[in-house]
Image: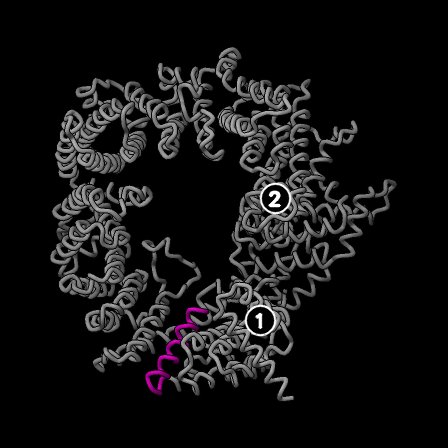
Amino acid sequence: MRDPGRKSLAQLENLCKQLYETTDTTTRLQAEKALVEFTNSPDCLSKCQLLLERGSSSYSQLLAATCLTKLVSRTNNPLPLEQRIDIRNYVLNYLATRPKLATFVTQALIQLYARITKLGWFDCQKDDYVFRNAITDVTRFLQDSVEYCIIGVTILSQLTNEINQVSATAFLIEADTTHPLTKHRKIASSFRDSSLFDIFTLSCNLLKQASGKNLNLNDESQHGLLMQLLKLTHNCLNFDFIGTSTDESSDDLCTVQIPTSWRSAFLDSSTLQLFFDLYHSIPPSFSPLVLSCLVQIASVRRSLFNNAERAKFLSHLVDGVKRILENPQSLLDPNNYHEFCRLLARLKSNYQLGELVKVENYPEVIRLIANFTVTSLQHWEFAPNSVHYLLSLWQRLAASVPYVKATEPHMLETYTPEVTKAYITSRLESVHIILSRDGLEDPLEDTGLVQQQLDQLSTIGRCEYEKTCALLVQLFDQSAQSYQELLQSASASPMDIAVQEGRLTWLVYIIGAVIGGRVSFASTDEQDAMDGELVCRVLQLMNLTDSRLAQAGNEKLELAMLSFFEQFRKIYIGDQVQKSSKLYRRLSEVLGLNDETMVLSVFIGKIITNLKYWGRCEPITSKTLQLLNDLSIGYPFPSRKLVKLSAVQFMLNNHTSEHFSFLGINNQSNLTDMRCRTTFYTALGRLLMVDLGEDEDQYEQFMLPLTAAFEAVAQMFSTNSFNEQEAKRTLVGLVRDLRGIAFAFNAKTSFMMLFEWIYPSYMPILQRAIELWYHDPACTTPVLKLMAELVHNRSQRLQFDVSSPNGILLFRETSKMITMYGNRILTLGEVPKDQVYALKLKGISICFSMLKAALSGSYVNFGVFRLYGDDALDNALQTFIKLLLSIPHSDLLDYPKLSQSYYSLLEVLTQDHMNFIASLEPHVIMYILSSISEGLTALDTMVCTGCCSCLDHIVTYLFKQLSRSTKKRTTPLNQESDRFLHIMQQHPEMIQQMLSTVLNIIIFEDCRNQWSMSRPLLGLILLNEKYFSDLRNSIVNSQPPEKQQAMHLCFENLMEGIERNLLTKNRDRFTQNLSAFRREVNDSMKNSTYGVNSNDMMS
């Protein structure tokens, strides 16, 4: 027997070598395939042990460790408890007897230990939780040499990380319907309460020992130990204590929810001091981790302390920060610098300015922080991503000034202007350096980052606003004058002009930001007059640059202008602004703009200029159109004033490519670049509606360019050979335009004009386009979206006269389009996974939305279709089923837009077309039911609520049919109902599983839509009374003996006063009972560790 074992061992080792070492892709893929088969083989466990015992290469040991991790993670056919205990013990012994393993092997084995421990956290053997002895398990490592000590600390670190991560268990529950998130939280909470503080204390004590022994910084192993100890401490402090799963994106709002039982560690100032001392005594390469720990410590929740304790803690924290600022050498390391900036930001996010000013060293510390910030801003090229935290600190400080009640001086009036000045001057100085050196990134290229910093500066700059304005006026006048002189000089170098344009770009952005920082209640007439000074200058510059656009323009400067106009619009345009504002007075004096209407004409003039000269520049065009759109929304102000402007009338009468180049058919651009046309026509549509009323002549005049475009496409389609690219571009542009108009026309009168214009004349052209180009989503998506907009009864605009058949005719066109697109898209065959959404699922999702809008629009009586033998409804519904069956279940939930469109359509179908659902084939019904079952546990609340509603309609239908079938009636059940009942009786497990799922969510989950969950639950219980009774008994029996009576009583109360019917009064009573039931169950299960076991029972 030995030889075959050795032979297979050698083969496995060879495969490992091929997988990890070979450069030949084919060999690697074959090895991977063979190793996957090995992982799934029945003798995998024994072979893994053999590989660990006798394997000669590190790769074979790695394979064994990863295979064992997969085995212990298995949910179907899990390993028995004894076997998992054996593996855990074997791994610990293996690590203890082989200190010289390759690092990645040690890591993989520790990962295996952590996974076993997490998944077995609630497993008992003879009343002992066998997987909860982590600290005991590692004690023998910690008492040995440094190498073993590193292994012990790494085990604790990896375990803490594993238990904290939801994603670590996400892939373990492929077929697990028992809500992994709840299990994860129960394990994490139990670990937090039983072990985490002991691990944190152990880690701090080991750090104290290490720092007290005068570390030998030349010793690699001691380096390694220190690094692992810091990682362990950081993992403890970074633990998700209350299940909020914060991520890095919410970094500046983070509060660390330290449990009250940890208070002693944080009241003891030596804990905080330990990390500040470590920072100063260890090499800079380790300091970032120390600072990360300090960031977490600085963020502990305020309620952990009383006021006196918090003041003392803050005092120690500020002293430590002061010490770092006085010895800033280590901050030259970018990682240290970044973490320190985060630490500074936490000073204000967690403490109030009133508390900070009372700290003994506050005046000195605020001076040091201001100097550090100014220096950082001046060195703008060093760690640019860290500036966000410094600006965030000053933004919060400046915003607190009006509210601070402390008598101690906050001194921000001295230092905030210095920070503002440093930001502004450093950005201006950066322009020349960036233009004169290759390879430097221009911050202006990253508009997102610029916008984020400007939002912060808008608050900082408003503190001591007179100084900010004086500085901006001085700098702007200097640059504008230099710029003008350069433009008039024949010998000016392009470099000098570019430098001044760059400086002016920054100044225009900053002026827009500080104007946007105006807070209405805190603003004075003097500040409005200062805003007026700034606005006048930007408008004068705009007149200068616009006059040169025929020769040259600067894209970045134009984008800055648009940002400025957007801020100006928000603050000073609209009926909420005092027209007597000093800003308008200043505009009148300098530029002759006497009122808001004249200012609006400047806006529209700029918009038209941009569309004329920048039509080929997508960023400028889209932002310009967004500005126009924002102006048009403000009904009745300022849109009534806008419509009276001659420039707006010009746009309404001349929206052609001759005047607006972006409306042209440019063969160089992508079809997707036409998206901005929808925004343009939405704005024009709103402006047209202001005075349109019932004037059909004015409407037809407006539609002339679109009529010409439709006629051109119709002409092309009527010939056998036509330029396909031209036809596509004309049609896509046209349907995008129409969708904008359809969206804007949300009143019956105007929408009927649009409907009568497009139907029946132009509908066939849209159908033909779908028929020809169904495989090209760049064409079909805009057409389908237009149709979905046309059938959407927004604001009850689709109300046809009683003698009009238009509702039915519109649905026929909808059905025709869905059927044509659906049947053709299914001929595409196999689509690559990475393209499946773009090529297929996106179009299907829009079809679902379209059908849902048509079915729920209340403008069609769907009963007439069958009555008159019209197959339009049947065709649409059958196409829906075909499309649905072509989508794997996983995709339904993987793509959010598809999920929402599918489940909202299903809700309408189960509500109004249950006879159709009942008539479907058994496999289709099972597909739909299982999609509802999966949707019940979706993270998207909208999807989950929609599934509850669908399930409620289905259960109600079933209950009614069952009730009828048991009554003696002269009229038998129709064939569909009879079949549906029969299918449900053959497959009771589907409904039973959903009962189990819903009850499980209500009892064990953080149920965010309890009312929705309660509606189907009563029907599910009444349909499955015996199953519900068994389920109830299992849950009661799984509780500790002393809690079983209380749980039994909860279930008794749930059904108290509930009758065997689904009448509204009975349902409402059940919903009330359920609320009380959930509260009582949660109270009963508090402090009980048995919840997860009952959770398991319900799988």
The three-letter code of the residue at mark 1 reads: Leu
Q: What stretch of residues is rendered in magenta?
A: 142-162
Query: Hey, which quadrant is residue 1025 in on the image?
Result: bottom right
Mark 1 crowdedness (10 Å alpha carbons): few <14, some 14-19, many ≥20:
some
Q: Position of residue 86 (x, y in %)?
A: 54, 83
In the picture, measured across the screen, residue 96 lies left or right of residue 714, that is left
Judge whether residue 150 is colored magenta.
Answer: yes
Tell me the quadrant of the picture where the N terminus can be found. Answer: bottom right
In the picture, measured across the screen, residue 801 lies left or right of residue 532, that is right
Q: Is residue 23 above or below residue 733?
A: below
Mark 2 crowdedness (10 Å alpha carbons): few <14, some 14-19, many ≥20:
many
Q: Is residue 71 above or below residue 858?
A: below
Q: Position of residue 418 (x, y in %)?
A: 14, 46
Residue 571 seen by the camera: no
Q: Is residue 473 above or below residue 1088?
A: above
- The rendered magenta stretch, by its main secondary structure, is classed as helix
Residue at image mark 1: 35
The three-letter code of the residue at mark 2 reads: Tyr
Say which residue appears at 40% left-offset and 87% top-offset.
140
Is 26 or 332 nearer to us in this picture? 26
Residue at image mark 2: 902
Q: How is the image coloured?
A: one colour
Mark with earlier residue (1, 2)? 1
| Mark nearer the viewer, 1 or 2 | 1
Q: Position of residue 444 (x, y in %)?
A: 28, 41
Is 601 or 261 nearer to us in this picture? 601
Q: Residue furthest front?
A: 24
Say which residue appears at 23% left-offset and 62% top-offset.
333
Query: Hey, which quadrant is residue 229 in on the image?
Result: bottom left
